[in-house]
Amino acid sequence: MKIGLEVHCQLLTKTKLFCGCRNDVSKEPNTLTCPTCLGMPGSKPRTNRKATEYAMKIGLALSCKFHKEAFFSRKSYFYPDMSKNFQITQYELPFAREGCVVVNKKKIRITRIQLEEDPARLVHVGGLGGDYVLVDYNRSGTPLVEIVTEPDFSSPKEARMFLDKLSSILQYLGVFDPNIEGSMRCDANISLESARVEVKNISGFKEVERALNYEIVRQKNEIRRKGKVLRETRAWDDVAGVTRSMRLKEGEEDYGYIFDTDLPRITIEKEVIEEIKAAMPELPAQKISRYTKELKIPLELSMSIVSEPDLAMMFEQVIEEIDPQLAAKWFAGEIKKTLNYSNLRMKGTGLEAKHLVSLLRMIENKQLTDRSAEMMLREIVTHPMDPGKLVAKRARIYDESVLEPVVQKVIDQNPKTLMDYKSGKQEAFNFLVGQIMKQTEGRGDADTIRKILHKKIN
């Protein structure tokens, strides 16, 4: 099995790649356009400087080599999403080449990194093969970086892990926002001792894994039936969970690449590369190394925290006042779990470092049980506030006069468990403690509960 990916990421520039139109695909369709991004005769493109800097930054982050210069070519094809009948992209001399990304100690080779314009967005009304297709040219000309890998993946899961890591790197660089719909799309190439099949425009990392798994089964069945796996381009239908044939796969020569004479060659100077390199942020792998070596945080927790830049940024603010070990346990565990449950990212919650410092300090001082703190966290994630205002109804209960009636109630409700304990089954005692904690909504102090329980049943 051989799998290679072509990943297309929208860059966070203010304007499009070759014109001054705003880079914002979310507006009313066909309102952010001009003669250049519509491909009108006589219109002249000019290159977005910030996009070229972003391409170099990505090349550095992925350990790539740079050509002395780069230039743009015209890739000819006839389709409604590209009204001028060619796409401005790079072919002969892209910005960067021969890099790598390490996934589970395995090097995934990066073939090339190039800039190109995004075509328009096609909306298939009624799904693929539906009634008609709408075209929105707002997206036409959006800056894309295309990252092409060698066929180094040995499973769909490995491809998904690579995309997770790549997305994290691009977020740390500040060049990409995963919250924008369609901001990262993927073409997957796969072959099973047969012709290479390309699956186009897959959105979402889970969908890449699903599409590849389906294609493996489809090709295996074709080979088993002594059929022929065609070299073709297929589309992924995420609703039906199948790939559908679009066209036979063209070769590079069919695109008729020619140098775009409207755009100048771009000289990639060493001085510029060094300037960009000096301003590079700390990347995920570097953070993980620092957390494990300097802060003594376990690798698994470090990787979990670093997976989201805003989460890592908040963590670093919090550990200025809170023990890093405690903070790491909560950030990688309950905080991340609560964010995922609420379908939120740290950036979108409105939480401030002082809120989490206050919460973790109450845990540290044993004012809150872990369960109470988790319940409080769920509240402040959706309604940011000082946890101190909620502590009265969530504070840990130490008072024996409050806990004793609850303990007696649980004993009375569980006579069989009490008999099991007296016959030597220690797990019965732990069950009773758990039931008492449940009755107190997780607020009861476990040590105090055990003390009262021992006194009553021994």
Image: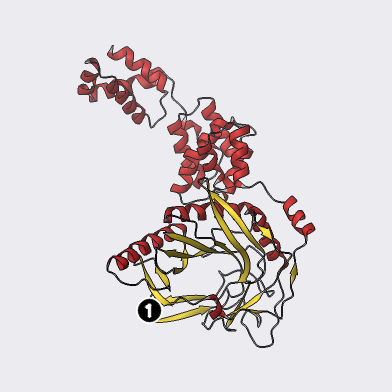
Q: Quadrant of residue 32?
A: bottom right
Tell me if residue 204 comes above or below residue 337 in the rendering: below
Which residue corresponds to the image point at 37% horizontal and 59% vertical from the top-left? Answer: 213
Is residue 66 left or right of 1 when viewed as pictured? right
Q: Quadrant of residue 311?
A: top right
Tell me if residue 233 comes above or below residue 64 in the rendering: below
Q: Which of 210/395 is in front?
A: 210
Q: Which of 153/334 is in front?
A: 153
The C terminus sits in image quarter: top left
Is residue 111 left or right of 244 when viewed as pictured? right
Which residue lies under the disc numbered 1?
130
Which residue corresponds to the image point at 59% horizontal and 75% vertical from the top-left? Answer: 140
Q: Which of 228/132 is in front?
A: 228
**Percent x, y for residue 158?**
46, 53
Which residue corresponds to the image point at 50% horizontal and 41% vertical from the top-left? Answer: 335
**Percent x, y for residue 370?**
45, 31
The N terminus sits in image quarter: bottom left
